[in-house]
Image: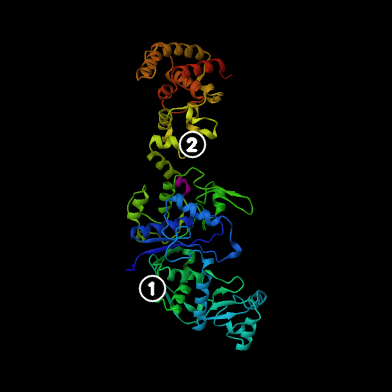
Amino acid sequence: MSARKVRVRFAPSPTGPLHIGGVRTALYNYLFARQHGGDMILRIEDTDSQRFVPGAEEYINEALHWLGIKIDEGVREGGSYGPYKQSERRDIYRAHVKQLLDADRAYIAFDTPAELEAARAATPNFQYDASTRLQMRNSLSLPREEVERLLADGTPYVVRFRIEPGREVVVNDLLRGEVKISSSVLDDKVLYKSADDLPTYHLANIVDDHLMEVSHVIRGEEWLPSAPLHVLLYEAFGWSDTRPDFVHLPLLLKPDGKGKLSKRDGDRLGFPVFPLEWHDPKSGDVSSGYREKGYLPEAVVNFLALLGWNPGDDTELMSMDELIQKFSFDHCSRSGAKFAFEKGKWFNHEYLQRLSDAELAQLFKPVLKRHGVDPEAYSPEYLEQVVGLVKSRINFVDDLWDQASFFFEAPTTYDPKAIKKRWSPEMPAILGQLIELLRDLPDFAGPSTEAAVLEWIASKGYHLGNVMNAFRLTVVGECRGPHMFDITRLLGLDETVKRLERGIATITPAE
């Protein structure tokens, strides 16, 4: 690894919501930077003006903030290497385009879209390179006077990088090792377009990484084919000695089948592929997000970290600080990682269990409000005891309502299957006797209640399962939930009796 200070950058384009694969790239950049005492830069690559989407930049910032990925330098944070938005760096790019033109490492091309299409139609697998460039309309094939006239007339043009064939280009990748490719297979990429006075990704990326003193470029493997071009650009500018180290991360793959993870996979299988909910400003479509689905940010971070990396042992649950301490590219996979979304639910369950009952009760309050229950009508102690009884059964905070609604609302309907199995014609009379027993107990909320009820059932020769499940049916509405006497202890004698009486009056045996 380079001896210079570690400086990494995450450089998304504001063309829509941040994909979960991009989040993992940002996370790995952050873990690596923090482990080495380095800086994390957020650079907005908005040179593709045709694909700009309003709100996307704000979404990116909010998503990283929610996940706890802290940015040291960026559009919001500022810094000594700005501007951090590429559309605000036009003068910088123009100067570097001129530098390449003056050094004869680039040239101006005037080919129209129609001319390029004709060349592709005439030549199978056409590539704009050393073998074809002199057949096209550019400053290498046209007389100087013609080039000057076209420029004076304002004719649209692009600047292409001049790649000479027959060279072996070596890319050193910290994950994949030495990657070699012949320059003969590379085309003369467009670096700049006069139409919008902006560079393409290739030029802007190299110039910004150099000027911002980026030490490591950690990005997805889809950018690996562009790495040889970038190596040549660093050379053309005379920056080979300060070229950053490359790391090309494996793709996130579909949970089933083959190919890269897409939004369609999430829609098909019912999981989000974006960190936050996204409202498309053009179509109005709403895409689900991990935050709105009830995932804790710590769980999402832990889940993503282990998609393509492992700590070298069987440890699965790790805080951000622990991930920073353990992270290493030595334990990153070179092959793609299947997006095991069900494992994400497991992580969320585990992180919910780590919360105190008081913390979980606070998260439960908005859920109660959505269901028409005023949480302020209940003491903090009551809410904490409720979540403490059911939290082992939940994967998401919203699940608390499914597991604990009966603590706030008496049942109005009763499970037909439980009635058929547990409710005999004799059951109303038996439960009537139970009511009298409960009313006569000296300490209904005490531990002796359960023993007294079980002793009474045994002394009467009643069927334990039938009586206790019928009791639960009247109180809960179905035969599920935590320990029965924990439920009645929280509800209290009056509410428990009221529900018993309502069940006795309402439930009729199944025919």
Seen from the viewer's position, the closer of residues 3 and 208 is 208
Q: Residue at x 42, y 37 (%)?
A: 360
Instruction: Please say if 45 is above or below 424.
Output: below
Is residue 343 covered in magenta? yes
Give the CA distance from mark 1 to mark 2: 52 Å
Seen in the image, is 403 located left or right of residue 51? left
Q: Is residue 447 magenta?
A: no
Q: x%, y% of residue 142?
A: 61, 86
Mark drawn on residue 399: 2
* Residue drawn 55% across the image and 53% down it: 263
- Tell me where residue 110 appears, x and y as whole percent: 62, 79
Q: Which residue is mark 1?
A: 242
Q: Position of residue 4 (x, y in %)?
A: 34, 68
For residue 118, above or below residue 497? below
The residues colored magenta run 340-344
The type of residue carrying mark 1 is: Thr
Residue situated in front as seen by the camera: 256 or 316: 316
Q: Nearer the viewer, residue 497 or 51?
A: 51
Q: Residues within 10 Å of mark 2 (few under 14, many from 20)?
A: some
At mark 1, the secondary structure is helix
Q: Is residue 226 visible?
A: yes
Q: Which image quadrant for residue 440?
A: top left
Q: Is residue 131 left or right of residue 154?
A: left
SS for tag 2? helix
- Which SS type dominates the magenta stretch? helix
The quarter of the rendered structure image containing the N terminus is bottom left
Viewed as shown, does residue 318 lie left or right of 261?
Answer: left
Residue at 51% of width from left, 66% of height from top?
86
Instruction: Categorize mark 1 by other alpha carbons within 10 Å: few (<14), some (14-19), many (20+).
Output: some
User: At label 2, which amino acid type do we have?
Assistant: Asp
* Residue 181 in view, yes or no: no
The location of residue 81, given as percent across then percent down, is 43, 66
